[in-house]
Image: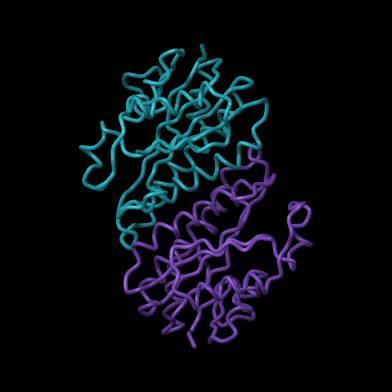
Chain colours: A cyan, B purple
Amino acid sequence: MKTVVVIGALGMMGQAALSGLTRHKVVTASRSGKGCDFQVDITNKDSLRKLFESVGEFDAVVNTVGHCEYAPFQEMTSDQWATTIQSKMLGQINVVHVGLEYIKDGGSFTLISGILNMKPVPQAIADATTSGAIDTFVKCVAHELPRGIRINVVNPTVLEEAMDVYGDMLRGFQPVPGALVGKAFERSVDGFVTGQVLFVDA
Amino acid sequence: MKTVVVIGALGMMGQAALSGLTRHKVVTASRSGKGCDFQVDITNKDSLRKLFESVGEFDAVVNTVGHCEYAPFQEMTSDQWATTIQSKMLGQINVVHVGLEYIKDGGSFTLISGILNMKPVPQAIADATTSGAIDTFVKCVAHELPRGIRINVVNPTVLEEAMDVYGDMLRGFQPVPGALVGKAFERSVDGFVTGQVLFVDA
C-alpha cells in the first residue's frame, strides 16, 4: 500500500483516478479544499510546498487538475492563453518541481493531459497545445528524475461522466467510463513505466 | 515570387531560412533591428502589429526566433520557464495571431521548434517542452486558419554553423548544414502542405 496524494480529487477526472487507487492510502487535495484533506493551488509553488509539508511522507502524486480556456484561435486572448498555461502546463510542472523535494525514493508522479492534442477540435487550441507540452515534458523530464522516481501522464478521451459538459464540443468522440481511465492512473502508480503517455481512447 | 517576412533574420537559423528563400522577395526583421529592414519583439503583440503594418502586403511569415533558457529541471526557476514560454511558445503564437490579420489569402506561416523534444538531453527541458507545444500548436491550429492560409513548423537538429555554441550540450548529434534546413523552410513557403512538422535530422 502506497500513500498517494491526489490533487483535484473532487473533479470528474479526480474521481476517475480514485477509482483506480482503492488499494492505496489516498490523501486528497483540491483548490477549494472542500471535502478534501487539504487545500492547494497548483499555480502557486508556496501552496504546493505547504501541501506536501502537511501531508508528510508519500509515495506518489496524482494530479488531475488543469484548467483550460476554450475559444476559436483568432478570438483567444492573451489572458486566456496565460490562464491555460499557468494551470494546465506550468501548474503541473510546479507539482513535479516542488513535489520532488518531498516525495519518497522510488515514488511517482502522474499528470493529466487530454486527447485533443491528437484529435483536434474547434475551440480547443489552448487545451491541445498545453497537452502537447505536458506529454513532451513527461517524456523528456523522466530522464532527469533522481532517486528512482518515475513520471507518466494520462491522456484520456472524454469521460462518460463528462459528456453533458463536453458532448457538444466533442461530436464523434466515443466516451470512456471513468473507471477505465482509473486503470491508467493505477498502471502509472503501481507499475514500473516512466516517461510514458498513457492514452485512454476508444 | 512571394514577399516573405523573415523574423530573426540575422541569427544562424534565420540565415539558414534565407538560404532557402533566394527566389523570393525577403523582408527581414530582428529584435534589435540592426542590419534588418525592421525591428520587432515577438513577445509584444503591438510590436508585431507595427511590423506587419510597416511591411505592407506579404505572402509568408517565417519565424526563426525562440529564446530558451537551459538548466537542469530541478534548478530551473519559474523565471526561466516564463522567459522560455514567452518567447519560444507564446511569441510564436503571437506571430500567427497578429500575422493572420495582415497576411494575404493563401499565405503561410513557418515557425521553428527543435529536435530536443524528440531527442532529450540534459539542461534542455524548457526547450523540449516548448518545442513539443509548438509542434502540437501547428498540427492543431492548421485546421482553423482562414482564407487558404497554411502553417508548418521546421524542427531541425543542430546546425553545423552552431556547433561551437551547442556542441558540448549535444554530444552524439550529427549536425546538418544550414542550407539543408533552408530547404525545409522553402518546402513550407513554396509547397502546399499545412499542419506539418518538417523534421530536419541526420
Is residue B39 or residue B123 the one in the foreground?
B123
- Residue A195 image point, x, y percent: 57, 36
User: Could you say which quadrant of the image residue A154 lies in?
Assistant: top left
Is residue A93 or residue B40 the one in the foreground?
A93
- Is A21 placed left or right of B153 in the picture? left
Residue at 62% across, 73% down: B182
Instruction: Decide: is A191 above or below B52.
Output: above
Residue at 44% across, 76% down: B50
- Is A17 placed left or right of B110 in the picture? left
- Residue A123 image point, x, y percent: 30, 53
The residue furthest front is: A202
Instruction: Decide: is A37 above or below A94.
Output: above
Is residue A74 or residue B41 the one in the foreground?
A74
- Residue B202 image point, x, y percent: 69, 61
- Residue A107 image point, x, y percent: 58, 22
Instruction: Decide: is A3 above or below B155.
Output: above
Labels in figure, total: 0
- Is A78 placed left or right of B179 in the picture? left
User: Could you say which quadrant of the image residue B201 lies in?
Assistant: bottom right
Residue at 38% across, 21% down: A18
Instruction: Decide: is A146 above or below B50.
Output: above
- Is A69 placed left or right of B4 in the picture? left
